[in-house]
Amino acid sequence: MWRTFVITSVLGVSIPAASIADAAGTWQDLCDAKTYKSAAGESLPYRLLKPEKIEPGKTYPLVLFLHGAGERGADNAKQLTHGAREFAKADVRRRHPCFVLTPQCPEGKRWVEVDWALPAHTMPAKPSVPMRLALELVDKLVGDLPIDKGRIYVTGLSMGGFGAWDAPLRRPGLFAAAMPVCGGGDLGQAAKFKDMPVWAFHGDHDHTVLPSRTTDMIEAIRKAGGHPKMTIYPGVDHDCWTATYANPKVLDWLFAQQKQQP
Protein backbone atom coordinates (compact mmCIF):
# COMPACT_ATOMS: atom_id res chain seq x y z
CA MET A 1 0.00 0.00 0.00
CA TRP A 2 1.31 3.45 -0.87
CA ARG A 3 0.60 4.82 2.59
CA THR A 4 3.69 3.00 3.84
CA PHE A 5 5.93 5.27 1.77
CA VAL A 6 7.85 8.18 3.15
CA ILE A 7 5.94 11.18 1.87
CA THR A 8 7.74 14.45 1.29
CA SER A 9 5.61 17.55 1.80
CA VAL A 10 5.83 20.74 -0.22
CA LEU A 11 2.64 22.27 1.12
CA GLY A 12 2.58 25.59 2.87
CA VAL A 13 4.39 27.48 0.11
CA SER A 14 3.47 31.14 0.03
CA ILE A 15 3.14 32.53 -3.48
CA PRO A 16 3.44 36.33 -3.64
CA ALA A 17 0.57 37.67 -5.74
CA ALA A 18 2.79 40.24 -7.44
CA SER A 19 5.28 37.66 -8.64
CA ILE A 20 2.49 35.56 -10.15
CA ALA A 21 1.00 38.59 -11.87
CA ASP A 22 4.38 39.53 -13.25
CA ALA A 23 5.00 36.04 -14.58
CA ALA A 24 1.53 35.81 -16.11
CA GLY A 25 1.81 39.23 -17.71
CA THR A 26 5.22 38.74 -19.29
CA TRP A 27 5.37 35.00 -19.92
CA GLN A 28 4.21 35.05 -23.54
CA ASP A 29 6.39 38.07 -24.33
CA LEU A 30 9.44 36.30 -22.93
CA CYS A 31 8.94 33.17 -25.04
CA ASP A 32 9.65 32.93 -28.74
CA ALA A 33 6.67 31.51 -30.65
CA LYS A 34 7.77 29.07 -33.32
CA THR A 35 6.61 26.00 -35.24
CA TYR A 36 8.65 22.85 -35.74
CA LYS A 37 8.32 21.18 -39.14
CA SER A 38 9.34 17.54 -39.46
CA ALA A 39 10.95 16.04 -42.55
CA ALA A 40 7.53 14.56 -43.36
CA GLY A 41 5.87 18.00 -43.19
CA GLU A 42 4.24 17.52 -39.77
CA SER A 43 3.91 20.60 -37.57
CA LEU A 44 4.24 21.21 -33.84
CA PRO A 45 3.80 24.72 -32.41
CA TYR A 46 6.04 25.57 -29.48
CA ARG A 47 7.30 28.32 -27.22
CA LEU A 48 10.91 28.66 -26.14
CA LEU A 49 12.11 30.58 -23.11
CA LYS A 50 15.81 31.42 -23.28
CA PRO A 51 18.26 32.49 -20.56
CA GLU A 52 18.23 36.27 -20.01
CA LYS A 53 21.87 36.37 -21.04
CA ILE A 54 23.72 33.73 -23.02
CA GLU A 55 27.42 33.91 -22.29
CA PRO A 56 29.93 32.82 -24.94
CA GLY A 57 31.31 29.35 -24.31
CA LYS A 58 28.69 28.50 -21.68
CA THR A 59 25.95 25.86 -21.93
CA TYR A 60 22.56 25.84 -20.21
CA PRO A 61 19.97 23.27 -19.08
CA LEU A 62 16.93 22.49 -21.22
CA VAL A 63 13.52 21.72 -19.69
CA LEU A 64 10.93 19.94 -21.84
CA PHE A 65 7.59 21.00 -20.34
CA LEU A 66 4.51 18.98 -21.36
CA HIS A 67 1.15 20.65 -20.70
CA GLY A 68 -2.20 19.12 -19.76
CA ALA A 69 -5.24 18.16 -21.84
CA GLY A 70 -7.04 21.48 -21.40
CA GLU A 71 -4.23 23.37 -23.10
CA ARG A 72 -4.29 21.45 -26.39
CA GLY A 73 -4.84 23.41 -29.59
CA ALA A 74 -3.06 25.35 -32.30
CA ASP A 75 -2.91 28.87 -30.86
CA ASN A 76 0.64 28.39 -29.50
CA ALA A 77 -0.42 30.09 -26.27
CA LYS A 78 -2.68 27.92 -24.11
CA GLN A 79 0.16 25.56 -23.25
CA LEU A 80 1.63 28.36 -21.13
CA THR A 81 -1.39 28.48 -18.79
CA HIS A 82 -0.21 26.26 -15.93
CA GLY A 83 3.13 25.54 -14.33
CA ALA A 84 5.45 26.57 -17.11
CA ARG A 85 5.06 30.25 -16.28
CA GLU A 86 6.93 29.67 -13.02
CA PHE A 87 10.15 29.28 -14.99
CA ALA A 88 9.72 32.84 -16.29
CA LYS A 89 9.75 34.48 -12.86
CA ALA A 90 12.63 36.88 -12.47
CA ASP A 91 14.08 35.15 -9.41
CA VAL A 92 13.92 31.73 -11.06
CA ARG A 93 15.62 33.02 -14.20
CA ARG A 94 18.41 34.49 -12.06
CA ARG A 95 18.92 31.30 -10.03
CA HIS A 96 18.46 28.86 -12.88
CA PRO A 97 19.19 30.31 -16.32
CA CYS A 98 17.91 27.75 -18.80
CA PHE A 99 15.97 27.02 -21.96
CA VAL A 100 12.35 25.95 -21.43
CA LEU A 101 10.66 24.21 -24.35
CA THR A 102 6.86 24.15 -24.22
CA PRO A 103 5.34 22.45 -27.27
CA GLN A 104 1.56 22.39 -27.83
CA CYS A 105 -0.25 19.12 -28.43
CA PRO A 106 -3.04 19.34 -31.06
CA GLU A 107 -6.70 18.84 -30.16
CA GLY A 108 -7.69 15.19 -30.26
CA LYS A 109 -4.12 14.00 -29.68
CA ARG A 110 -2.23 13.03 -26.52
CA TRP A 111 1.38 12.92 -25.44
CA VAL A 112 0.67 9.25 -24.69
CA GLU A 113 -2.28 7.63 -26.46
CA VAL A 114 -3.78 5.84 -23.45
CA ASP A 115 -6.89 6.18 -21.26
CA TRP A 116 -5.98 8.39 -18.29
CA ALA A 117 -8.86 7.06 -16.16
CA LEU A 118 -7.62 3.47 -16.09
CA PRO A 119 -5.74 2.08 -13.06
CA ALA A 120 -2.87 0.97 -15.34
CA HIS A 121 -1.75 0.97 -18.97
CA THR A 122 0.77 -0.69 -21.25
CA MET A 123 3.17 1.62 -23.04
CA PRO A 124 2.20 1.85 -26.74
CA ALA A 125 4.75 0.33 -29.09
CA LYS A 126 5.29 3.66 -30.82
CA PRO A 127 5.27 7.19 -29.39
CA SER A 128 2.30 9.39 -30.20
CA VAL A 129 2.89 11.79 -33.08
CA PRO A 130 3.11 14.84 -30.76
CA MET A 131 5.60 13.03 -28.51
CA ARG A 132 7.72 11.97 -31.47
CA LEU A 133 7.77 15.52 -32.81
CA ALA A 134 8.61 16.95 -29.38
CA LEU A 135 11.60 14.63 -29.05
CA GLU A 136 12.74 15.45 -32.58
CA LEU A 137 12.53 19.11 -31.61
CA VAL A 138 14.65 18.51 -28.52
CA ASP A 139 17.32 16.95 -30.75
CA LYS A 140 17.17 19.94 -33.08
CA LEU A 141 17.52 22.47 -30.26
CA VAL A 142 20.45 20.55 -28.77
CA GLY A 143 22.17 20.87 -32.12
CA ASP A 144 21.32 24.54 -32.60
CA LEU A 145 21.66 26.04 -29.11
CA PRO A 146 24.24 26.05 -26.29
CA ILE A 147 22.48 23.33 -24.30
CA ASP A 148 24.17 21.27 -21.60
CA LYS A 149 23.59 17.66 -22.74
CA GLY A 150 24.03 16.48 -19.17
CA ARG A 151 21.16 18.65 -17.89
CA ILE A 152 18.13 17.97 -20.09
CA TYR A 153 14.95 17.48 -18.04
CA VAL A 154 11.36 16.47 -18.69
CA THR A 155 8.34 17.45 -16.63
CA GLY A 156 4.64 17.70 -17.24
CA LEU A 157 1.25 17.83 -15.58
CA SER A 158 -1.81 15.58 -15.98
CA MET A 159 -1.73 14.52 -19.66
CA GLY A 160 1.82 15.91 -19.61
CA GLY A 161 2.53 13.87 -16.48
CA PHE A 162 1.91 10.74 -18.53
CA GLY A 163 4.28 12.23 -21.09
CA ALA A 164 6.96 12.80 -18.46
CA TRP A 165 6.88 9.07 -17.65
CA ASP A 166 6.84 8.14 -21.35
CA ALA A 167 9.54 10.40 -22.83
CA PRO A 168 12.56 8.90 -20.97
CA LEU A 169 11.51 5.44 -22.16
CA ARG A 170 11.39 6.63 -25.77
CA ARG A 171 14.85 8.18 -25.53
CA PRO A 172 16.98 6.29 -22.97
CA GLY A 173 19.98 8.31 -21.87
CA LEU A 174 18.64 11.67 -23.02
CA PHE A 175 17.16 13.04 -19.81
CA ALA A 176 18.99 13.74 -16.57
CA ALA A 177 15.77 13.70 -14.52
CA ALA A 178 12.01 13.29 -14.82
CA MET A 179 9.38 15.15 -12.80
CA PRO A 180 5.87 13.81 -13.54
CA VAL A 181 2.95 15.66 -11.92
CA CYS A 182 -0.39 13.82 -11.47
CA GLY A 183 0.35 11.42 -14.31
CA GLY A 184 0.95 7.71 -14.72
CA GLY A 185 3.38 5.30 -16.34
CA ASP A 186 3.65 1.69 -17.45
CA LEU A 187 4.44 -0.44 -14.39
CA GLY A 188 6.12 -2.98 -16.64
CA GLN A 189 8.68 -0.33 -17.60
CA ALA A 190 9.25 1.05 -14.09
CA ALA A 191 12.57 -0.73 -13.55
CA LYS A 192 14.07 1.33 -16.37
CA PHE A 193 13.83 4.37 -14.08
CA LYS A 194 16.01 2.70 -11.44
CA ASP A 195 19.06 4.85 -12.16
CA MET A 196 17.26 8.07 -13.11
CA PRO A 197 16.43 10.84 -10.62
CA VAL A 198 12.62 11.01 -10.43
CA TRP A 199 10.37 13.16 -8.28
CA ALA A 200 6.66 12.48 -8.78
CA PHE A 201 3.67 14.40 -7.39
CA HIS A 202 -0.03 13.67 -6.89
CA GLY A 203 -3.01 14.78 -4.82
CA ASP A 204 -4.52 11.99 -2.72
CA HIS A 205 -8.06 13.15 -3.61
CA ASP A 206 -7.46 13.26 -7.38
CA HIS A 207 -10.66 12.32 -9.19
CA THR A 208 -9.21 12.71 -12.70
CA VAL A 209 -6.08 10.55 -12.55
CA LEU A 210 -5.96 7.94 -9.80
CA PRO A 211 -3.30 8.69 -7.14
CA SER A 212 -2.25 5.05 -7.46
CA ARG A 213 -0.91 5.85 -10.95
CA THR A 214 1.93 7.68 -9.18
CA THR A 215 2.26 5.62 -6.01
CA ASP A 216 2.35 2.31 -7.91
CA MET A 217 5.11 3.59 -10.22
CA ILE A 218 7.19 4.81 -7.29
CA GLU A 219 6.75 1.50 -5.46
CA ALA A 220 7.79 -0.44 -8.57
CA ILE A 221 10.90 1.70 -9.07
CA ARG A 222 11.88 1.23 -5.44
CA LYS A 223 11.40 -2.53 -5.70
CA ALA A 224 13.76 -2.44 -8.69
CA GLY A 225 16.41 -0.77 -6.54
CA GLY A 226 15.80 2.87 -7.44
CA HIS A 227 15.49 5.82 -5.11
CA PRO A 228 12.76 8.08 -6.54
CA LYS A 229 11.14 10.89 -4.57
CA MET A 230 7.39 11.24 -4.17
CA THR A 231 5.10 13.93 -2.81
CA ILE A 232 1.47 13.16 -2.05
CA TYR A 233 -0.64 16.23 -1.21
CA PRO A 234 -3.25 15.44 1.48
CA GLY A 235 -6.77 16.57 0.59
CA VAL A 236 -5.77 17.83 -2.86
CA ASP A 237 -7.70 16.94 -6.02
CA HIS A 238 -6.22 17.10 -9.53
CA ASP A 239 -4.49 20.47 -9.31
CA CYS A 240 -1.32 19.65 -7.46
CA TRP A 241 0.79 21.42 -10.08
CA THR A 242 0.26 24.92 -8.68
CA ALA A 243 2.02 24.13 -5.40
CA THR A 244 4.60 21.94 -7.13
CA TYR A 245 5.98 24.37 -9.69
CA ALA A 246 5.71 27.37 -7.36
CA ASN A 247 7.95 25.69 -4.78
CA PRO A 248 11.58 26.89 -5.14
CA LYS A 249 12.86 23.69 -3.54
CA VAL A 250 11.31 21.62 -6.32
CA LEU A 251 13.03 23.64 -9.05
CA ASP A 252 16.28 23.66 -7.08
CA TRP A 253 16.16 19.85 -6.99
CA LEU A 254 15.42 19.62 -10.70
CA PHE A 255 18.32 21.83 -11.78
CA ALA A 256 20.70 20.08 -9.39
CA GLN A 257 20.38 16.82 -11.33
CA GLN A 258 23.14 16.09 -13.81
CA LYS A 259 23.65 13.11 -16.09
CA GLN A 260 27.12 11.62 -16.12
CA GLN A 261 28.71 11.99 -19.55
CA PRO A 262 30.48 8.97 -21.10
Image (tube, rainbow, N blue to C red):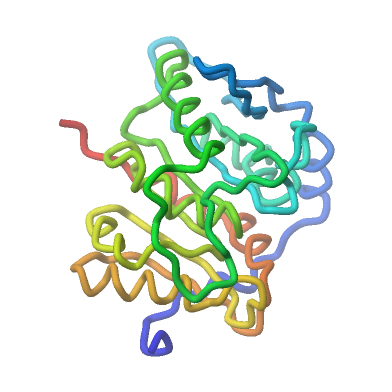
Q: Is residue 213 above or below residue 124?
A: below
Badge count: 0
Residue shown at 28% from the left, 67% from the top: 221
Place residue 206 in its image quadrant: bottom right
Q: In this view, does 80 lie to the left or right of 95?
A: right
Q: Is residue 25 left or right of residue 145?
A: right
Q: Which of 41 and 139 is in front in this view?
A: 41
Where does residue 113 sit, x and y in percent of width and height?
A: 53, 52
Q: Is residue 184 above or below residue 54?
A: below
Residue shown at 38% from the left, 89% from the top: 1
Furthest residue to the left? 262
Q: Nearer the viewer, residue 11 or 193?
A: 193
Q: Which of 262 and 127 is in front in this view?
A: 127
Q: Is residue 21 above or below residue 116?
A: above
Q: In this view, does 227 lie to the left or right of 118?
A: left
Where does residue 119 sit, x and y in percent of width and height?
A: 49, 76
Furthest residue to the top? 56
Quarter containing the C terminus? top left
Place residue 123 in its image quadrant: bottom left
Q: Is residue 217 left or right of residue 66?
A: left
Where does residue 92 sit, x and y in percent of width and height?
A: 60, 42
Q: In this view, does 17 lie above or below 8?
A: above
Residue shown at 40% from the left, 43% from the top: 126
Residue shown at 74% from the left, 31% from the top: 76
